Amino acid sequence: MGKTISDFKQINTKFNSQKAVNQENTSKKASVNGFWEKNGKVLKKILTILLSVGVGAINGLFGGGGGMLVVPLFTVFMGLEEKRAHSSAILAILPLSLISGIIYLVRGDFTLYSGGFVTAGVILGGILGTFVMKKLSNNVLAIVFYAVMIFAGISSLVGALNR
């Protein structure tokens, strides 16, 4: 059976209405993408600042650990390669650790005798670690770093649950 002119008009009307919907959706997507293109860098900077404040608060609350959180901040949000992120984390956390340490010392929450031995070991280990890091690829460094984070987290959690 043949199609009538009326049938073709209906098909054409449906096609044109679907085409209009598709154009509207494309326009909406373009405006959303345009928003992120215009404002994405600013929003990323704001988010980075907010996360940095959170890292500082966590470091102050627990007396450390901020460096472990700063590395993903540097790699994910700031796009640094792994080695540069680790090096930058040390410099970012150093002033905070010094200030937190002084506050803990003044409040009497730090014992110089036991803390001194640990500090000496940490300094020696830090020096050794910088030489080892130079020899590792970014990928191996990332795998080792996140494996250590997972191990430390599980060990701490199990220890806390068994107290």
Image (tube, rainbow, N blue to C red):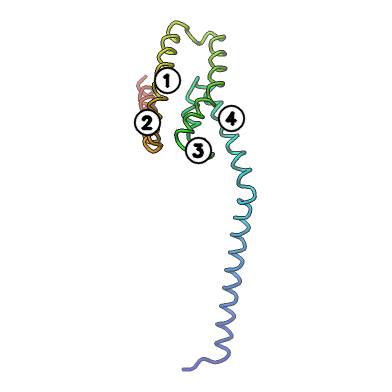
Residue count near mark 1 (Cα–Cα under 10 Å), binned few <14, some 14–19, many ≥20:
few
Q: Could you tell me how far apart the alpha carbons at marks 2 and 1 are, in whole angstroms? A: 14 Å
Q: Amino acid at mark 2?
A: Lys
Residue count near mark 3 (Cα–Cα under 10 Å), binned few <14, some 14–19, many ≥20:
some
Q: Amino acid at mark 4?
A: Val
Q: Nearer the viewer, mark 3 or mark 2?
A: 2
**SS class, disc 1:** helix
Please give the residue where the numbered disc 2 appears in the rendered image.
135
Q: Nearer the viewer, mark 2 or mark 4?
A: 2
Residue 25 vs 126, above or below: the answer is: below
Q: Could you tell me how far apart the alpha carbons at marks 3 and 2 are, in whole angstroms? A: 18 Å
The tag earlier along the polypeptide, 3 or 1, is 3
Left or right of 65? Residue 102 is right
Residue 38 vs 127, above or below: the answer is: below
**SS class, disc 4:** helix
Q: Are marks 3 and 1 in contact (CB under 8 Å)?
A: no
Q: Nearer the viewer, residue 107 or 138?
A: 138
Q: Nearer the viewer, residue 62 or 46?
A: 46
Q: Amino acid at mark 1?
A: Ile
The tag earlier along the polypeptide, 3 or 2, is 3
Please give the residue where the numbered disc 4 appears in the rendered image.
53
Please give the residue where the numbered disc 3 appears in the rendered image.
80
